[in-house]
Image (cartoon, rainbow, N blue to C red):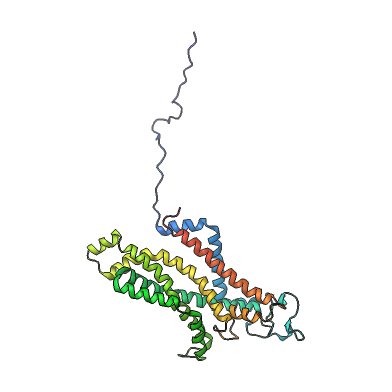
Amino acid sequence: MTTPTETSGPPSGAQPDGASTTAPAKKIEGRSPGRIAWDRLKRDKVALAGGVVVILLVLAAIFAPVLSSMFGHPPNEPHPDQINPDLGLPRGSFGGISGDFLLGVDPTFGRDVFSRILYGAQISMLVALGAAVLSVCIGVVMGVTAGYFGGWVDAFISRVMDILLAFPQLLFSIALVSVMPTSAFGIPDQWLRPLILVFVIGFFGWPYIGRIVRGQAMSLREREFVDAARSLGAGRTHILFRELLPNLVAPILVYATLIIPTNILNEAALSFLGAGVRPPTASWGQMLSEAVRIYQADPMYMVVPGLAIFITVLAFNLFGDGLRDALDPKGN
């Protein structure tokens, strides 16, 4: 009778004497809210692409003089030899695009469109970013104050916001710019009008973020950590700046990235209507206004600044949407 063959050695899966039978425990690392948001944002390729385009546009606006000297001509330098004297249009096809003029020339004076697009980006970014900062600063202060204190303070600030939201911003901007002198407070006209646009767009834009912050502050003031700080003797200033504001950073950042493209469109609209910067200072809206007269004969002069506005606004919106999803505490 045969018996099963006995095998020597340790059972399957067993380790030699002295060896550990368990794998080393995996180290658990905590992640800050900023790290979690960054990990989410990295997974959103569309938002990252929008952010890269935004960075490139900002760099192009900052280094406009360098890029203009390397790849183009001074923005206000006329080139009458590039204009057909009989038709008053650029020589060549597609608005006079060539190796010397990468985006062609304008039909009036033969100025380099590439350089004017770069310098127009300076005006658009300056007005959009400046107005966004002004709107955020005023809106956050007024919104937090109204949401935290409530009562007659909330009622007064809310009515002010309602009035500003109903105010005809466009008409006020045109009227204000039309009566402004060429220079004031020692500021030349080249920078005076952009600063006026920053003030007008930013001042009339703060009620939007003010309402958002007010609603968030009203919700946060009833939370347990605010009651705990109040019970420990914290004053109103401490609660406002150390308890409420840090929890409002996410909606403020999201709103700031989404209001910038709106400000770009507002600046372009005002420049289109003649309430923006004065010629010959380059502006995207002003270029579109000039292109209206000749777009049928030279459509490229309208396409180029139109694409510049479209790409800029789209990039900011895509990045703002991705940032909003990344900062959402309920997101995956």
Name the residue at the right extreme: 86
Q: Determine whether, in the image, residue 109 is placed left or right of residue 310.
A: right
Q: Is residue 40 above or below residue 58?
A: above
Residue depicted at 29% across the width and 60% down the height? 225
Residue depicted at 42% across the width and 67% down the height? 252
Q: Position of residue 322 (x, y in %)?
A: 50, 61
Instruction: Compare residues 330 and 5 and report the one nearer the observer.
Output: 330
Q: Position of residue 82 (x, y in %)?
A: 73, 82
Instruction: Compare residues 257 and 63 and report the one nearer the observer.
Output: 257
Q: Determine whether, in the image, residue 21 is placed left or right of residue 69.
A: left
Q: How many marks?
A: 0
Name the residue at the top extreme: 1
Instruction: Compare residues 157 and 286 and report the one nearer the observer.
Output: 157
Q: Determine whether, in the image, residue 236 is placed left or right of residue 113.
A: left
Residue depicted at 56% across the width and 78% down the height? 269
Instruction: Compare residues 275 and 327 and report the one nearer the observer.
Output: 275
Residue depicted at 48% across the width and 62% down the height? 323
Q: Position of residue 65 (x, y in %)?
A: 59, 79
Q: Position of residue 157 (x, y in %)?
A: 35, 75
Residue 122 shows in this picture:
no
Residue 295 shows in this picture:
yes
